[in-house]
Image (tube, grey):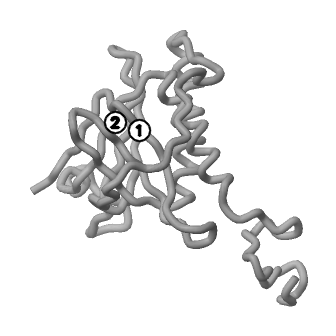
Amino acid sequence: MTQVFAFEPPERFVAGTVGVPGERTFFLQARGSGRLVSVVLEKVQVTLLAQKLEELLTEAHRRFGVEVPEEAEGLDDNEPLETPLDEEFRVGTLGLSWDGDSSTVVIEAIAVGEYEAEEPTEAELATLDRLRVRLTPAATRAFIARAKRVVAAGRPPCPLCGQPLDPGGHLCPRHNGYRR
């Protein structure tokens, strides 16, 4: 049976990690109405989610005149993820939309699933668990800021190739495989 974890709006919605840089697990976590839901996703998904949310806010402002704060003053959330940290599912697909009636951003994180073809059909997606969150533009801006901080807190990039540096260095393609 499909579960939809809906938080419209959540008391808290954040991206966070557990583990040391290079071995971190990324989470989206929503809290509200006495419930706490955590889902696992990849670093690149957190990065893309923040980028696409910024684009969505810019487009909402351009097309509908929505007031979008430049910064989410007073909404900064630097607290760690809440426990217990029980993974509900691993995110396969992220969906974003703008709800013009309520002037809110809707984020859907949909579980990984098995599909007949490479791209899932609407019917196949409808059978998968999902986390649905509805955020104001200010709360969205706060989420973006935290997501960027979480991603940036990882391993520093190699100045030559941009790949993450491990504490012992890495095999840089710009040095023909020699360890730096």
Residues at marks 2 and 1 touching, judged by CB atoms closer than 8 Å: yes
Give the quarter of the image for residue 111: bottom left
Crowdedness near tag 2: few (<14), some (14–19) or many (≥20) residues, C-alpha within 10 Å: many
In this rendering, is residue 41 above or below 54?
below
* Closer to the eye: label 2 or 1: 1
Identify the mark nearer the N-term, 2 or 1: 1
Quarter holding the N terminus is: bottom left
Q: Judge left or right: residue 123 versus residue 171.
A: left
Crowdedness near tag 1: few (<14), some (14–19) or many (≥20) residues, C-alpha within 10 Å: many
In front of the other: 51 or 168: 168
Q: Judge left or right: residue 61 versus residue 38.
A: right
Q: Judge left or right: residue 175 versus residue 165.
A: right
In front of the other: 105 or 9: 9
Give the quarter of the image for residue 162: bottom right
At label 1, the amino acid type is: Phe
In front of the other: 178 or 10: 10
Label 2: element kind:
strand
Q: Horizontal and vertical percent for residue 168?
A: 77, 82
Label 1: element kind:
strand
In front of the other: 33 or 152: 33
Going 78% across and 64% down the picture, which residue do you hit? 157
Going 64% across and 46% down the picture, which residue do you hit? 149
At label 2, the amino acid type is: Val
Q: Which residue is mark 1?
A: 13
Going 23% across and 44% down the picture, which residue do you hit? 5
C-alpha span from label 2 to label 1: 8 Å
Q: Which residue is mark 2?
A: 133
Going 88% across and 78% down the picture, which residue do you hit? 174
In this rendering, is residue 158 above or below 133?
below
Q: Horizontal and vertical percent for residue 107?
A: 39, 38
Q: Which mark is residue 163?
A: none
